[in-house]
Image: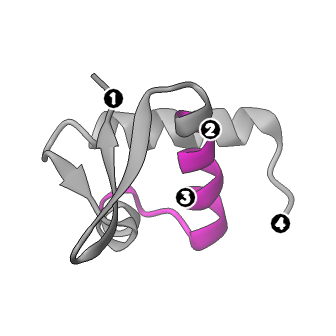
Amino acid sequence: MALNKQTIINNSKKVYACMYQMVHYTFNELQKICQLGNTELCLALVQLIQENKIKQDRNEQGIYYVLNG
């Protein structure tokens, strides 16, 4: 399935809206909450990182995502 730019933007808005519930999220947590596939979620996260809305970080448990600011 090819994803167009508008689909990616819509998915990124969905992910961003879901991220107000907790402090930080793993990829699997976001996938479960947002009900997106691997590719869709990856592209949405990249979009949000490029827009400087979220950041990706790492701790002893692994990679996580958190809202910027």
Label 2 is placed on what type of residue?
Answer: Gln
Residue 11, position in %: x, y? 56, 43
Q: Alpha-carbon neighbours of circle 3 within 10 Å: few (<14), some, or many (≥20)?
A: many
- Mark 4 or mark 3, whichever is nearer to me: 3
- Mark 2 or mark 3, whichever is nearer to me: 2
Please name the residue shown 62% across and 32% down the image. Answer: 50
- Mark 1 or mark 2, whichever is nearer to me: 1
Sooner in the amino-acid sequence: mark 1 or mark 4: 4
Q: Alpha-carbon neighbours of circle 4 within 10 Å: few (<14), some, or many (≥20)?
A: few
Label 4 is placed on what type of residue?
Answer: Met
Sooner in the amino-acid sequence: mark 1 or mark 3: 3
Q: CA distance from mark 2 to mark 3?
A: 10 Å
Q: Is residue 45 left or right of residue 29?
A: right
Q: Which element is circle 4 on?
A: loop
| Number of numbered callouts drawn | 4
Please name the residue shown 36% across and 73% down the image. Answer: 28
Disc 2 to disc 3: CB gap under 8 Å: no
Comparing 48 with 56, the one in front is 56
Sooner in the amino-acid sequence: mark 4 or mark 3: 4
Residue 1, position in %: x, y? 83, 66
Numbered badge on residue 41: 3
Q: Which element is circle 3 on?
A: helix
Numbered badge on residue 48: none
Q: Range of the magenta residues?
A: 33-48
On the image, numbered disc 2 is attached to which residue? 47
Numbered badge on residue 68: 1
Q: CA distance from mark 2 to mark 4?
A: 18 Å
How is the rendered protein coloured?
one colour
Residue 24, position in %: x, y? 21, 51
The part of the image, by quadrant, that contains residue 64 is bottom left
On the image, numbered disc 4 is attached to which residue? 1
Q: Alpha-carbon neighbours of circle 1 within 10 Å: few (<14), some, or many (≥20)?
A: few
